[in-house]
Each structure stands twice: as structure tokens, then as C-alpha cells.
Amino acid sequence: MPPTNTEVEIFGAVYNVRGSEDTEYLQNLAGLVDRKMREVAQHVKGDMTRIAILAALNLADELFRAQKQQEGERVEIREKVVELTEELSQALGR
């Protein structure tokens, strides 16, 4: 898909974002960032840069936690596959 330019609004400012994803996807990303910045702004006073950095740290934390959970789930799935493979082999007399 060729790069597209999409206008998004984040925390009251308009940005032109260029990306290979469709406009709706880029709007959804911007919406997530906007919501996170507004959430942070309710708890922290400061300029836009401070709010953006704290929002980015919050989003990075959420990403790392999700990745860690997924890795744990992958390990569980691999262990279950090994267990089921062994049971199947025994049932087939191998």
C-alpha cells in the first residue's frame, strides 16, 4: 500500500501524518495518543511536552506488559503442544 497523508488531531493540535496504513488506522492511533495525553493531563500539570512524554511512558509500559503477557502465553502454548504430542504418541503406540 502506498504511503498516505492523514490529518489527525492530538491534544488540540493538528498534525499531518504519513504512513503506509489506511487513514482509519492512523486516526485510531492518534485517538489513542490523544486519550492517553488527556488522561495524563488530568493528573499532571505541565506543558504539552511534559504531558506527551508521560503519555508516551504510559503507552510504552502498556506495550511492554502486553508483550510480556504474550510471551508467557506462547510458552504455555508450547508446553501444552509438547504435552498433547506426547499423549497422542502414547495413544498411537509410538
Image: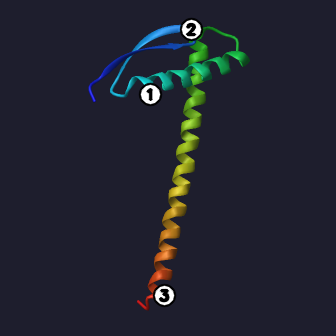
Q: How busy is the neighbourhood of tag 2: few (under 14 within 10 Å), some, or many (20 plus)?
A: few
Q: Which residue type does callout 3 highlight?
A: Ala
Residue at 29% x, 23% y is 3
Left or right of 81? Residue 11 is right
Give the CA separation, mark 3 to mark 2. Answer: 64 Å
Q: Residue 1 or 39: which is nearer the viewer? A: 1
Q: Secondary structure at mark 3?
A: helix
Residue 20 position (above or below residue 64):
above
Q: Residue 22 or 85: which is nearer the viewer? A: 22
Residue at 51% x, 52% y is 71
Residue 12: image tag: 2
Q: Which residue type does callout 1 highlight?
A: Tyr
Residue 25: image tag: 1
Expressed as whole percent of the image width and height from the top left, the position of residue 37 reads 61, 19
Q: Are marks 1 and 3 in contact (CB under 8 Å)?
A: no
Residue at the spot of label 3: 91
Q: Residue 78 or 57: which is nearer the viewer? A: 78
- The residue at the far left in this view is 2
Q: Earlier in the sequence, mark 3 or mark 2?
A: 2
Expressed as whole percent of the image width and height from the top left, the position of residue 72 reads 55, 55
| Image-quadrant location for residue 55 | top right
State the quadrant of the C terminus.
bottom left
Q: How busy is the neighbourhood of tag 3: few (under 14 within 10 Å), some, or many (20 plus)?
A: few
Left or right of 39? Residue 75 is left
Q: How busy is the neighbourhood of tag 1: few (under 14 within 10 Å), some, or many (20 plus)?
A: few
Q: Which residue type does callout 2 highlight?
A: Gly
